[in-house]
Amino acid sequence: MKKLDDSSIDLLLSDIPGRFGREWAGTGTTRPHRLLGGRTYEQPELDSDFFKEAFRILRKDKEWNTLNAEKKAKGDLPKGGAACVIRVPLENRTTRSSIQSMIKLAESLGFVYYGEILVALDVIGMGYDAGRDLGAKWLVFHAGERSGVLWDLSATNVIDAKRIRNPAKLGFAKHEAEKDPIEFISIIKAYSRRGDVVADFFCGVAKWAERTLELGRHLVLSDKSRRWVESVAADVSRKAGSLDGFQT
């Protein structure tokens, strides 16, 4: 993040691997990572350094959509802070404190908290209750007040997504934290437009990268483990034949 210029990113989104107060997260029960001695990736929590850098690199004068046809035709678009959208677990007795602390931290560093987008997963996990595995949500922050409306007027505040199962056998899925690409694509279509720069600094397997490039966005991706970034680049190159607009 520190290598990026000020006000250079139009949308930052990420499914961060933090524990969010869940001491059991990463230990596993019946899941394969239990047999591996734990998760195959680190679980850092977002801190003030992350939000400071995020606020710095996000555009403060990003153009937003408008419902005024005359202004849109003239290119007279309202402006405001670019979005920072973070995926977190649903709130319950173990996660509420961490999630609320994250919101307060972001607001103390200049972000405006706009609300949340819910993710409704297809089925409940084995033995889980009280929202622990029923779904998730994306917290929506902006680097300053946002003027105008979203670019995808059909966007909803609930995303129906499939659960990507942790593999019963090694090789079933590339990454233990893999998510349905529809979550990312829905947010990207709503909070950015063609030509915008989208960033994710915990990208993992990023199954949504190819579709994002097809939508005309540029990508800035990174991960603690470089092998995931190299894997994404290889997949995009093999399917699209080019890495135009793809920066890691």
Image (tube, grey):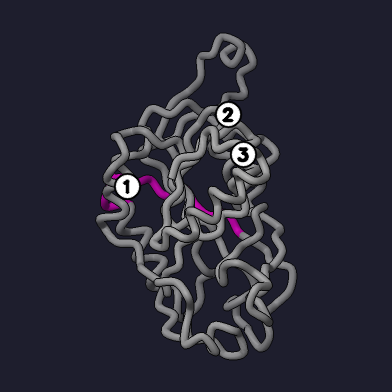
- Amino acid type shown at disc 3: Lys
The answer to whether one can see residue 139 in this image is no
Q: Residue at x 52, y 34 (%)?
A: 245
Taking the image as shown, residue 209 lies to the left or right of residue 49, namely right
x, y percent for residue 87: 51, 59
Q: Earlier in the sequence, mark 1 or mark 3?
A: 1
Residue beneath label 2, please?
Answer: 194
Bounds of the magenta segment: 107-118
| Front-lying residue, 82 or 35 | 35
x, y percent for residue 111: 34, 46
Q: Is residue 72 above or below residue 64?
A: above
x, y percent for residue 145: 39, 36
**Mark 3 against mark 2, which lies toward the viewer?**
2
| Front-lying residue, 224 or 143 | 224
Question: How far apart are the alpha carbons under marks 1 and 2?
Answer: 22 Å
| Front-lying residue, 45 or 210 | 210
Question: How far apart are the alpha carbons under marks 3 and 2?
Answer: 9 Å
Picture mark count: 3
Q: Count neighbours of disc 1 (C-alpha within 10 A) and say few if under 14, some if 14 to 19, many if 20 or more.
A: some
Q: Badges 1 and 3: C-beta atoms under 8 Å apart?
A: no
Residue beneath label 1, please?
Answer: 1
Q: Is residue 29 above or below residue 125?
A: below
- Amino acid type shown at disc 2: Arg
- Numbered circle sitting on residue 189: 3
The answer to whether one can see residue 233 in this image is yes
